[in-house]
Image: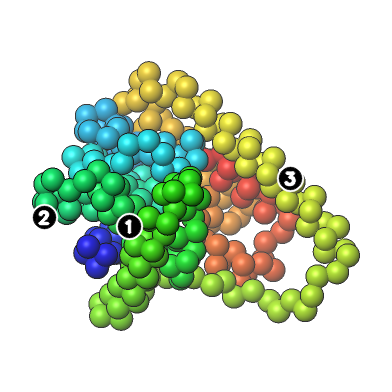
Amino acid sequence: MGVGLSLAAWCFLELIHQIQTWVFTDIPKDLGYHNGAPMWLYLVILGLAGVVAAFAIVRLPGKGGHIPAEGLKVGGATTQPIELPGIVLAALATIGLGLVLGPEAPLIALGAGLGLWAIRTIRSDTPDQAQAVIAASGSFAAMSMIFGSPIIAAVILLEALGLDRERLPLLLLPGLLAAGIGSLVSIGMGSLTGLSSSAYALGPLALPSFARPDVADFAWTIPLGIVIAMLCYAVRRIGLETLRGVPRRPLLLVPAAGIVVALLAIAFHATSGHSVNAVLFSGQDALPTLVSAAGSWSISALLLVIAFKGAA
C-alpha cells in the first residue's frame, strides 16, 4: 500500500505541475503571448478555478475537502473513498490554476481515502483500529512526496493528528515506514521518468554561509518572530471572516474570491514590478528564487509580497 499510495501522490503532484505549465505557459504561447501570460488571462483562469471548486463543494461528496482557514489538522472522521473525487477535483482546480493554496491537505486526504479503499477491498471486515492505522499510514506516504526527508512529513502529521500516548506508538512505526517508502518512490519516479520533483517538492534552499549567531542576531530575530506570529494571526482571521459569508452563496462567491486573488496579484505586479507568480500558487515554487535572488528584492517589495499574498 505504501508503494501504491506514494505513486498516486506522485501522479497527483505531477498532474498539478503539468496543469500549471499548460495553463500559464503553453496556452499564452499558443495565443501569441511569448513574453508571459497577459494580465487579463489571470482573471479568467482564477475565476474559472473558483467555478470548478464551487461545483466540487456544492455538488460532490466531501465538500471539496479540508477548509484551509481552519489550519492543518486531521481531526474528525477519516476521509472516505467516496469523497475523493470531489476533493481531488477541488485541489486540481485551485492549486493547478494558481490559487494561493498548498497541496498538503489534499495529499493527506488522498492517502487516507485510498488507504481505506484498499484495505476494505482486500478485507471488508477489517477492524476499525486497523483501518485507522492504514489511513494514517497512507497520509504519511503521500505527504513525504513534497519533503526531502520522511522525518519531516512524519513530524508534521503527528502534530496535525494530535495523538495521545496510547495511539502514538500504534501509528509511529507504520507511519515512518510509509513515509520512507514515499520518499524512495519520489526519488525513483523522478529518475525513471526524467520529471523533476523540484517543481513541487520542498528541497534544501541554497542559503549563504552563516558563521554563528551573535547578540545582534537575537536582538532582531526574536521581535521578528513575534511580528510574523501577529501577521499569521491576521491572515487566519481574514480567512475565517471570509468563511462566514461564502457558504451562503458558494457558486457566486467562490469564483468572485478567485477573481479577487487575481486582482491582488496584478496589483502586486503593478506596484512592485515583480512577477504575479510571487503572489499566486502555493509558495514553494517562488521560495527558492526569492532566496537565491534576494539582492533584487527591496524591503518595500518584500513587505508588498507579504501583504498581497497574505490577503490572497
Looking at the rendered structure, the kind of residue marked 3 is Val
- Sequence-wise, the earlier of marks 1 and 2 is 2
Q: Please tell me which residue lies in front, 243 or 310.
A: 243
Q: Position of residue 35 (x, y in %)?
A: 43, 62
Is residue 211 shown left or right of residue 13? right
Closer to us: mark 1 or mark 3?
1
Closer to us: mark 3 or mark 2?
2
- Sequence-wise, the earlier of marks 3 and 2 is 2
Looking at the rendered structure, the kind of residue marked 2 is Ile
Residue that appears at 34% across and 62% down: 174
Is residue 113 visible from the viewing direction of this image? no
Residue that appears at 88% across and 65% down: 215
Q: Position of residue 205 (x, y in %)?
A: 57, 71
Q: Position of residue 29 (x, y in %)?
A: 32, 61
Looking at the rendered structure, the kind of residue marked 1 is Ser
From the image, tell me which residue sits under label 3: 227
> Residue 137: which numbered mark, if any?
1
Figure colour scheme? rainbow
Can you say whether 228 is above or below 152 in the image?
above
- Sequence-wise, the earlier of marks 1 and 3 is 1
Mark 2 falls on what kind of element? helix
Residue that appears at 30% across and 32% down: 63
Is residue 234 visible from the viewing direction of this image? yes
Mark 1 falls on what kind of element? helix
Q: Residue 99's image quarter?
A: top left
From the image, tell me which residue sits under label 2: 122
